[in-house]
Image: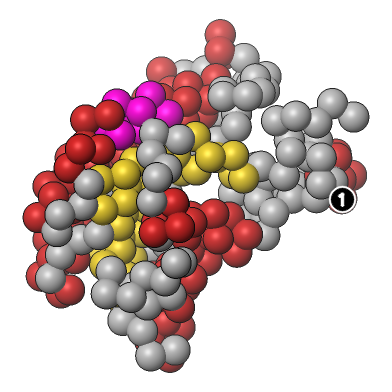
């Protein structure tokens, strides 16, 4: 039920963290994967790891904020593997933090373009390719920040990631009758390069915000992405799926 044999998947932000873990897991489950990110060498390293397991992967480095890149990514999936069934639009940016009165317009725009506009551009080209296959699964990485929890100093990040949930709901309603499911995945704190802790005490504090009293490993979030990509979630669409270790409900 969780297998992806015969499926073709795009994963953005695939050079590290959640994207890398998801690319490896999707490939392990039988998918042919198209890896996207800004760092060519790191993408090639992930593709090489996947190839060593006998699975297939191709890479394309570029900027997800660029519409031409979004189009080229789908063209690569179709040209190399014959179509597109799954897209995990995972790339994200925390960006500048601080009071909104001190937040520059450039930083606001960067967060919105990276986290939200890139998802629109991805979907714009991914959805027609999925329709050609008779359906598919479109996934966006959002967050609990701005959905269940307001965290001071994170206005641009929260607003842009919350916008993904609205986009998810609209696309799920628009394309459900055509066999396409659209969902948002909302991770909690995860041990990735984005999660930088200055001290051990800072990490311990963040871990304590979660009911599980720890942060996730990228592979744990990847398994939730696999659920949304696979037939295991065949009746799930328009959802904001929390995989947040209980940070949304924890008060102790």
Residue assigned mark 1: 200
Left or right relative to 206: residue 183:
left
Left or right relative to 213: residue 240:
left
Left or right relative to 154: residue 79:
left
- The quadrant in which the C terminus is found is top right
For numbered disc 1, what is the local secondary structure?
Answer: helix
Residue at 69% x, 54% y: name it. Answer: 216
Where residue 240 appears, as percent x and y from the top left, is 49, 34
Residue at 25% x, 59% y: name it. Answer: 85
Give the residues drawn in magenta, as a range: 164-172
Height in image: 241 above or below 23? above
Whether residue 166 is in magenta: the answer is: yes
Q: Main secondary structure of the magenta part?
A: helix
Q: Residues within 10 Å of mark 1 (few under 14, many from 20)?
A: few
Report whether residue 120 is seen. no
Report whether residue 235 is seen. yes
């Amino acid at each position: 039920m969780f297998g992806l044999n015969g499926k073709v998947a795009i994963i953005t932000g695939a050079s590290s963290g959640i994207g890398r873990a998801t690319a490896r897991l999707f490939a392990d489950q039988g998918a042919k994967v198209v890896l996207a990110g800004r760092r060519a060498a790191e993408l090639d390293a992930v593709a090489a790891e996947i190839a060593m397991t006998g699975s297939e992967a191709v890479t394309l480095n570029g900027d997800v904020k660029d519409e031409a890149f979004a189009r080229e990514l789908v063209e690569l999936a179709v040209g190399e593997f014959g179509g597109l069934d799954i897209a995990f639009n995972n790339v994200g940016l925390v960006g500048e933090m601080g009071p909104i009165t001190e937040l520059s317009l450039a930083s606001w725009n960067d967060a919105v373009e990276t986290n939200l506009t890139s998802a629109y551009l991805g979907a714009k080209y991914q959805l027609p390719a999925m329709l050609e296959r008779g359906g598919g699964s479109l996934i966006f990485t959002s967050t609990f920040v701005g959905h269940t929890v307001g965290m001071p100093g994170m206005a641009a990040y929260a607003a842009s990631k919350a916008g993904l949930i609205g986009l998810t709901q609209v696309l799920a309603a628009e394309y459900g009758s055509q066999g396409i499911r659209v969902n948002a995945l909302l991770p909690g704190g995860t041990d990735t390069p984005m999660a930088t802790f200055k001290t051990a005490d800072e990490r311990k504090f963040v871990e304590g915000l979660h009911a599980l009293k720890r942060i996730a490993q990228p592979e744990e979030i990847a398994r939730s992405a696999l659920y949304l990509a696979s037939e295991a979630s065949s009746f799930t669409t328009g959802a904001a799926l929390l995989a947040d270790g209980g940070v949304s409900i924890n008060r102790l």
